[in-house]
Image (cartoon, helix red, strand yellow):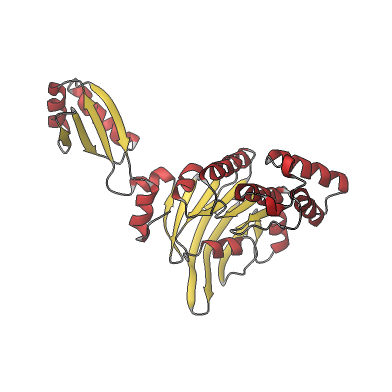
């Protein structure tokens, strides 16, 4: 596991912020930590990235103990926080060259690295312009490019698309996908449920310092009631026979459809179709409807997602 956390605890004064977190993040995947404001997401990222000490627990990142080997952890990771680390007084190129110097790259390697990142993030034309003139999306791309100067194996993205317009957000999503395809591990915190649904291989929901649910997006959706399969038939006889065969179903005679409660799993779909096949009922159309992550988040935490 690239990230392995057991029993992580952290308090501020008398307030418990993290209360026994357990996390496992495989290499080359996107792991998303969801939670409302104040749930402990940023505190988790700060501990995993050595910016804050834990009160208790075992935390390992890229094979290194965060408490005992912080320098080795820092050498393996990159962090893009909620707020941009871009220096507005410098140009885009100067921001990247500063990071190259901080990573002790030679002049030739630094120039090559900077040029490559400017091209990769579509910033070449704006390289000589002050960062203060950049749009929100350009600043976020520059911020992530600065994180990549050191070629990190693990990247922590703490609400990376907050405040971006929909197009800039989708541009950032594609960048994340490309990074993962190249083998980078991404630890993503977000309040945008669509973002987690689009990107994450696994999702954990954090509430009051505890993980209250974890799984793939589809696994989490299937935990919430309301899922169903909608079946449309070619004629009234097929609808009648299907209604008798399936039992518990909501019928729409005019549309020739049945709505059958289901979690949408392949096993349940096969069982439904097998029962119809046994009675030679032809299904004209089938669609699966499951709750979305917004429903999951609200049901689990009692708070609306974004």
At 71% from the left and 51% from the top, the residue drawn is 146
Which percent across, then down, holds residue 295?
34, 51
State the residue in front, 306 or 241.
306
Q: Residue furthest front?
A: 133
At 67% from the left and 41% from the top, the residue drawn is 121
Left/right of residue 266 with respect to residue 128 in the rendered view = left
Which percent across, then down, holds residue 162?
53, 54
Which percent across, then down, holds residue 170?
54, 42
State the residue in front, 143 or 3.
143
For residue 153, say whether it is visible.
Answer: no
At 36% from the left and 57% from the top, the residue drawn is 300
Q: Residue furthest bottom?
A: 14
Left/right of residue 302 with respect to residue 6 in the rendered view = left
State the residue in front, 106 or 29.
106
Specify the quadrant of the image occupied by residue 219.
top left
Left/right of residue 15 with respect to residue 239 in the rendered view = right
Specify the quadrant of the image occupied by residue 77.
bottom right
For residue 189, say whether it is visible.
Answer: yes
Q: How many marks?
A: 0
Left/right of residue 67 with respect to residue 277 in the rendered view = right
Which percent across, then down, holds residue 195?
49, 47
At 43% from the left and 49% from the top, the residue drawn is 215
Q: Residue furthest right?
A: 107
Specify the quadrant of the image occupied by residue 230.
top left
Please tell me whether residue 51 is drawn above or below residue 92 in the rendered image.
below
């Amino acid at each position: 596991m690239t990230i392995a956390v057991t029993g992580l605890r952290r308090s501020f004064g008398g307030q418990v912020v993290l209360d026994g977190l357990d996390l496992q993040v495989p290499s080359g995947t996107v792991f998303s930590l969801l939670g409302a404001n104040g749930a402990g997401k940023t505190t988790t990222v700060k501990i995993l990235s050595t910016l804050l000490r834990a009160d208790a627990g075992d935390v390992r990142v890229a094979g290194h103990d965060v408490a005992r080997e912080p320098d080795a952890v820092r050498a393996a990771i990159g962090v893009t926080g909620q707020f941009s680390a871009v220096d507005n007084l410098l140009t885009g190129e100067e921001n990247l060259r500063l990071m190259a110097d901080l990573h002790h790259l030679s002049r030739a390697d630094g120039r090559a690295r900077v040029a490559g990142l400017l091209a990769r993030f579509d910033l070449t034309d704006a390289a000589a312009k002050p960062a203060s003139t950049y749009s929100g999306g350009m600043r976020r791309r520059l911020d992530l490019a600065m994180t990549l100067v050191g070629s990190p194996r693990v990247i922590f993205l703490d609400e990376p698309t907050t405040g971006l317009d929909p197009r800039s957000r989708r541009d950032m999503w594609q960048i994340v996908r490309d990074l993962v395809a190249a083998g980078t591990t991404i630890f993503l915190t977000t309040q945008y449920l669509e973002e987690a649904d689009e990107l994450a291989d696994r999702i954990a929901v954090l509430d009051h310092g505890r993980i209250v649910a974890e799984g793939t997006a589809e696994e989490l959706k299937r935990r919430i009631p309301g899922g169903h399969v909608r079946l449309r038939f070619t004629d009234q006889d097929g609808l009648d026979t299907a209604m008798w065969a399936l039992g518990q179903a909501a019928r729409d005679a005019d549309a020739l459809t049945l709505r059958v409660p289901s979690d949408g799993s392949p096993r349940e779909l096969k069982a439904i179709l097998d029962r119809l096949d046994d009675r030679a009922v032809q299904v004209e159309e089938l669609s699966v409807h499951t709750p979305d992550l917004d429903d999951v988040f609200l049901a689990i935490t009692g708070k609306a997602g974004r």
